[in-house]
Image (tube, grey):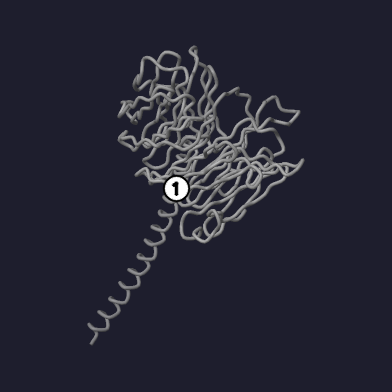
């Protein structure tokens, strides 16, 4: 009896001590987790800030792509590399700087654009359109009238604006060279087409028209649908929006359901998911020097109207919903502006600089040789730069 009482008392005491020890250990572990969590947050913040405000100091040449270049050579990012083109031909340069394919042609003042795997090249004011796939295989299209603009969708659907004698035409072709749609437009009824863009899937076309109404001018943004929604519409016209006292020379799809119309005094963002509708207007109070855009951001480079500032230009960057993500004053003189994975790239005759979306200047350099072209590739930190005597793949270091 006594033994059992003593034994029972002993078991109760050990259990109580064990519970206290367990609670103490949990408290210690909780404090350790809090401390480790705090350290991890500090480390992550430090890594984030280091990446966001990183600075590069030099360009390392990874490969010389070409020793002899044409003075009109231009480049743009394509897949993991770059497309380089001029009046004599076009080539695809991979991310390692090797020429994957090269095709010759003779096109004066070429218009070149791409979407997905396909690249379209057209003879401006001529009748020929070339369609390349990612391997360099080409198909040729012969337009009925002179080509003034061309766009391509990811399936190889081509939209072309053609100039007739007294009217204009918008024609669509598929990748098999079949003509899909012809839309006739006249200056009196529709206006003069300033710019077009085709959605990624090739089912919707956005057109900016300049309309003269008596002594007044206005800009009309029209949306044509070549899918089910546009079947019952006259000329496939799904919606149109008029803007007084505004000229819209550039219009672009950004992603699947967003269209940006860049005017001389405002930028209009449309949502095209169901029926096209205005989502946002951004008013502009300074003269626009340049515009750059891609699928996720656009940048406006404006004349700086601040009298107290010595910087000549004001850079504003927005995401595709119209939210301003960066604003910075700059004094850099430039001839071209590009958006790349690292930020906004400014290229002048002998100078380049780069500003990320935090407004931090990541890189700037003066060159002894004249820059003919410089553009991002499909890889971060890698750029294709063309001087007067050579083209090089370079990397920011």
Q: Which residue is drawn at 57% across and 36% down?
A: 165
- Percent coordinates x, y for residue 143 in the rendering: 45, 37
Residue 4 falls in image quadrant: bottom left
Residue 397 seen in this snapshot: no
The furthest residue to the bottom = 1
- Residue 137 drawn above or below residue 98: below
Q: Which residue is drawn at 56% across and 51% down?
A: 223
Q: How many labels does the image show?
A: 1
Q: Mark 1 points at which residue?
A: 200
**165 with respect to 243 (left or right):** left
- Percent coordinates x, y for residue 178 in the rendering: 38, 46
- Percent coordinates x, y for residue 296 in the rendering: 50, 44
Pick whichever, 23 or 51, lies toward us: 51
Circle 1 Cα neighbour tier, 10 Å, few/some/many (<14 / 14–19 / ≥20): many
Residue 186 falls in image quadrant: top right
**378 with respect to 332 (left or right):** left
Quarter holding the C terminus is top left
- Percent coordinates x, y for residue 62 in the rendering: 35, 22
Residue 79 seen in this snapshot: yes
């Amino acid at each position: 009896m006594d033994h059992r009482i003593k034994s029972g008392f002993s078991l109760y005491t050990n259990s109580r001590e064990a519970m206290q020890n367990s609670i103490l250990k949990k408290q210690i572990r909780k404090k350790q987790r809090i401390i480790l969590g705090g350290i991890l947050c500090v480390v992550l913040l430090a890594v984030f800030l280091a990446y966001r405000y990183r600075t590069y100091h030099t360009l390392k040449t990874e490969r010389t792509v070409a020793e002899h270049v044409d003075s009109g050579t231009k480049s743009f990012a394509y897949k993991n590399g770059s497309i380089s083109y001029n009046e004599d031909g076009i080539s695809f340069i991979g991310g390692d700087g090797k020429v994957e394919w090269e095709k010759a042609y003779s096109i004066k003042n070429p218009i070149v654009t791409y979407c997905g795997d396909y690249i379209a090249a057209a003879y401006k004011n001529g009748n020929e359109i070339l369609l390349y796939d990612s391997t360099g295989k080409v198909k040729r299209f012969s337009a009925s009238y002179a080509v003034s603009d061309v766009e391509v969708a990811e399936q190889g659907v081509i939209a072309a604006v053609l100039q007739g004698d007294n009217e204009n035409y918008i024609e669509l072709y598929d990748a098999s060279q079949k003509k899909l749609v012809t839309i006739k437009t006249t200056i009196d009824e529709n206006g003069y087409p300033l710019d077009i863009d085709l959605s990624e899937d090739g089912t919707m076309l956005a057109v900016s028209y300049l309309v003269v109404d008596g002594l007044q001018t206005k800009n009309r943004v029209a949306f044509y649908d070549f899918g089910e929604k546009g079947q019952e519409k006259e000329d496939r016209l799904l919606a149109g929006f008029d803007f007084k006292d505004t000229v819209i020379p550039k219009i672009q799809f950004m992603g699947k359901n967003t269209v940006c119309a860049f005017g001389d005094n405002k930028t209009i963002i449309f949502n095209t998911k169901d029926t096209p509708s205005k989502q946002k207007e951004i008013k502009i109070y300074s003269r626009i020097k340049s515009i750059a855009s891609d699928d996720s951001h656009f940048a406006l480079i404006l004349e700086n109207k601040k009298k107290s500032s010595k910087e000549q230009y004001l850079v504003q960057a927005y995401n595709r919903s119209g939210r301003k993500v960066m604003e910075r004053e700059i004094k850099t003189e430039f001839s071209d502006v590009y958006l790349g994975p690292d930020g906004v790239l400014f290229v002048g005759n002998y100078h380049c600089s780069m500003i990320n979306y935090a407004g931090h200047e990541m890189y700037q350099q003066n060159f002894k040789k004249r820059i003919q072209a410089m553009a991002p590739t499909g890889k971060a930190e890698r750029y294709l730069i063309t001087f007067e005597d050579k083209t090089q793949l370079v990397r920011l270091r």
